[in-house]
Amino acid sequence: MSSFYALVIGAGSVIAQATIQKFEADPNCLGVFAVSRSLPKISTESKALWLESDYSEESIHQICKRLALYAGKITKVLICNGMLHDESIMPERKLEEISASQLEAVFHVNTVIPMLWLSKLLPIIQGEQPTQVALFSARIGSISDNKTGGWYSYRASKAALNMLIQTSSVEYARRAKNVKLIAFHPGTTDTPLSKPFQRAVPQDKLFTAEFVATQLLSIMEGITMDNKAAYLDWNNQTIEW
Ligand SMILES: NC(=O)c1ccc[n+]([C@@H]2O[C@H](COP(=O)([O-])OP(=O)(O)OC[C@H]3O[C@@H](n4cnc5c(N)ncnc54)[C@H](OP(=O)(O)O)[C@@H]3O)[C@@H](O)[C@H]2O)c1
């Protein structure tokens, strides 16, 4: 593999951090741009350059201007942002729990923010080198696989993200032929996002972030560059859209 730079957006994510550690240990990785709402508390000697962002359009635009210097050299991109719950939000179990504010908040983090990056990153990743962009989706966003219902805002926001990835891949195929877009399902992983829902998960189905990071980087490395979006799980298995 030739040398490369990585870009990790939503770098505060536990899975993102495990992936950054792997990039840092990889001699072919020349540097990691890590974008997050907050910078790490302790600065360590590392290959990672942390960039603070509130994910507004202006902030994304400014960061992309800085990254333009590395256009064609950033060949691994992860967009990790996702929200399932917070202090005032829990996944909806029934129609009576639907609210405009929850739908809007969850769509903003899970759908709007990743799409803004996909739009603004085009000139930076439009190069000669094979480049993979992994956007963190979820199996629950599969429309054809929806048997249990519920979790309206999270489910629909990931389904909408999948549609935006598919749609972008049509344009990327014309304008950035060396880019592969991947809608990635990490599996249930031990992070703050899944914490309240882990009790129902068998121990061998609750992955560590380190395991998922290893799986994802191996998938990105081996993937066929065919100008089509892929929807893949942690085990490199295709999920029906
Ligand atoms: N853990 C699982 O079981 C599981 C299963 C399926 C899919 N996923 C997906 O995997 C991705 C990574 O999640 P994780 O499990 O590593 O969770 P996590 O550790 O809780 O990370 C959450 C991520 O979402 C971003 N985020 C959270 N609230 C935000 C807000 N209000 N505005 C903007 N960004 C916000 C954070 O970005 P900052 O760095 O800027 O804070 C961070 O990247 C998510 O997209 C999630 O939906 C996770």
Image (cartoon, rainbow, N blue to C red):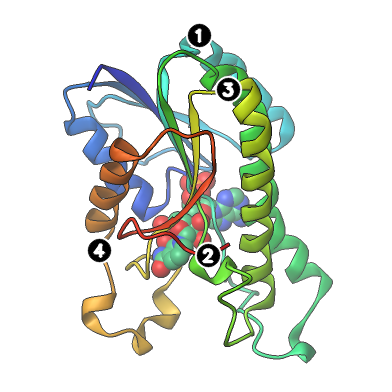
Mark 1 vs mark 3, CA separation in Å:
18 Å
Q: Residue furthest top?
A: 69
Q: Is residue 91 above or below residue 74?
A: below
- The kind of residue tagged 3 is Ala
Residue at mark 2: C-beta within 8 A of ligand 1: no
- 65 vs 178, left or right, is right
Q: Which one is closest to the eye, mark 2 or mark 3?
A: 2
Q: Which residue matches tag 4?
A: 208
What residue is drawn where x is 36% and y is 41%? 41
Give residue 210's position: percent from left, percent from top: 23, 54
Q: How far is the residue under mark 1 from the one under mark 4?
A: 34 Å
Residue 19, visible in the rendered structure:
yes
Q: Which residue is mark 1?
A: 69
Q: Nearer the viewer, mark 2 or mark 4?
A: 2
Please name the residue that numbered disc 2 is placed on.
240
Which circle's residue, 1 or 4, is located before the other in the chain? 1
Count residues near mark 4 (Cα–Cα under 10 Å), then give few for <14, some for 14-19, many for 20+. some
Amino acid under disc 4: Thr
